[in-house]
Image: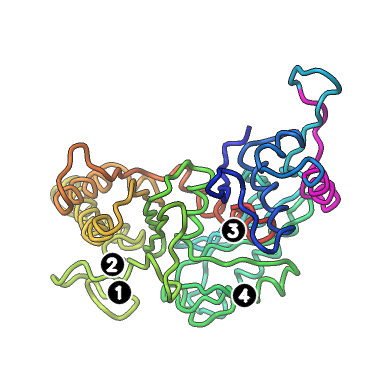
Amino acid sequence: MTSSRSRLRTGADGTASLPSDGRAHNLALVLRTLHAAGAMSRANLSRALGLTRVTISDLVTELIARGHAVELGPSDEVRPGKPSILVDINRRGRQIVGLDLTENNILHAAVMDLDGRILARSERAITTENGEELTALVAELAVTAVGMATAPLLGVGVGTPGVVNNDGVVITAPNLGWTDVPLGAIIAEATGLQTVVNNDADAALHGEYTFGHGSDDMILVRVGRGVGSSLMVGGVRARGVHHAAGEIGHVTVGTDGGAMCRCGRTGCLETWLSVPALESSLAAAALAADSGEAARDVMRVAGERLAISLAPIVAAIDVEEIVLCGPAALLDGTLIDSVRETLALRVLPVIPPPTSVRLAHEPENTVLRGTAVMVMSSQLGVE
């Protein structure tokens, strides 16, 4: 049994609904069921999906021929007659390359299997602030990661700061110096593989939801080179009409000055909460007479500003949890406590608080694992 979670579309009678373009969706339903539940017999798949055994057998045969599913051998289930043969998604026979571009000084890449397990890693130090040079560095890292794969690749997934459209174009990413960069097309040309690009917080949301037991209604806040968030509402990720849902990093959370943001304004959440901003403020606090109290004040204020930006969203859509994804050494302790305390003061008072605040599961890998989910969704229909 795998710990990942894939979602099944179901009809009013509880059986899987079959969209008009039937076969492709039926194939995806089989893969989604196996990814979520683990190995099953054809008979159990038939019962789970409400499809005939003949249909399931035909679908499984095609998936095995494609290399997307495998037979694992006889079931241990005790039953009359010949033992059933278990079928599973090809978890080890297909791999995915993921890129995480969120950290302040380093670009990360990994080769993963279909359970989100990281099999190999590579990274590159960010040595330039020139957008074109950085694009070339990202493409070179992708090619290197592809060379580390030990099984056929389904594709490449990328989690990047900024606003990204459905075609993999980074519309704007001020912290990377990018405007209208066709990142998906650039990496696809460099690697020869299908490439899916999403905002880093969206990628992290996918990773947390599928592999980290995230709820159907949550806000994930990604803290790295910049600050962004992604929203899951009723089990569906909210994108927004301009592909910018969750772009809270440049929401004004202070009219009391603050550092100049890369976007050209002051008062942006990013100027208090991004990793570079926190590290700079903590370095200054270390010079104070009471350095410990000064450092706690930095973290308290950052948590306060984050809660100010989140409170209206929490009140509007009534989420179950807020998940913070970033360096645990910075986010845990004073900062997350400040988020909880400030949020409680700014939404309807209920005991216990209706919205929990926690750290992401394996935050250092959440974006990478989310890129694997993105590729599986694109190539296999597994969500």
- Indicate left or right for 342 with 16 as reference: left
> Crowding at label 1, few (<14), some or many (≥20) Cα neighbours within 10 Å?
some
Q: Are marks 2 and 4 in contact (CB under 8 Å)?
A: no
Name the amino acid, label 3.
Met
Name the amino acid, label 4.
Ala
Mark 3 = which residue? Answer: 374
Nearer to the camera, 339 or 71: 71
| Separation (CA) of disc 1 from disc 3 | 30 Å
Secondary structure of the residue carrying tag 1 is: loop
Mark 1 = which residue? Answer: 261
Question: Does the magenta portion include 74?
Answer: yes
Secondary structure of the residue carrying tag 4 is: helix
Mark 2 or mark 4: whose residue is earlier in sequence? 4
| Separation (CA) of disc 4 from disc 1 | 25 Å
The residue that appears at 52% across and 48% down in the rendered structure is 12
Mark 4 or mark 3: whose residue is earlier in sequence? 4
The residue that appears at 23% across and 46% down in the rendered structure is 340
Mark 2 = which residue? Answer: 271
| Separation (CA) of disc 2 from disc 4 | 28 Å
Answer with the quarter of the image where residue 48 lies: top right
Nearer to the camera, 33 or 99: 33
Name the amino acid, label 1.
Cys
Question: Does the magenta portion include 324?
Answer: no
Q: Position of residue 377 (x, y in %)?
A: 62, 57
Name the amino acid, label 2.
Thr
**Tag of residue 136:** 4
Q: Position of residue 28 (x, y in %)?
A: 68, 53
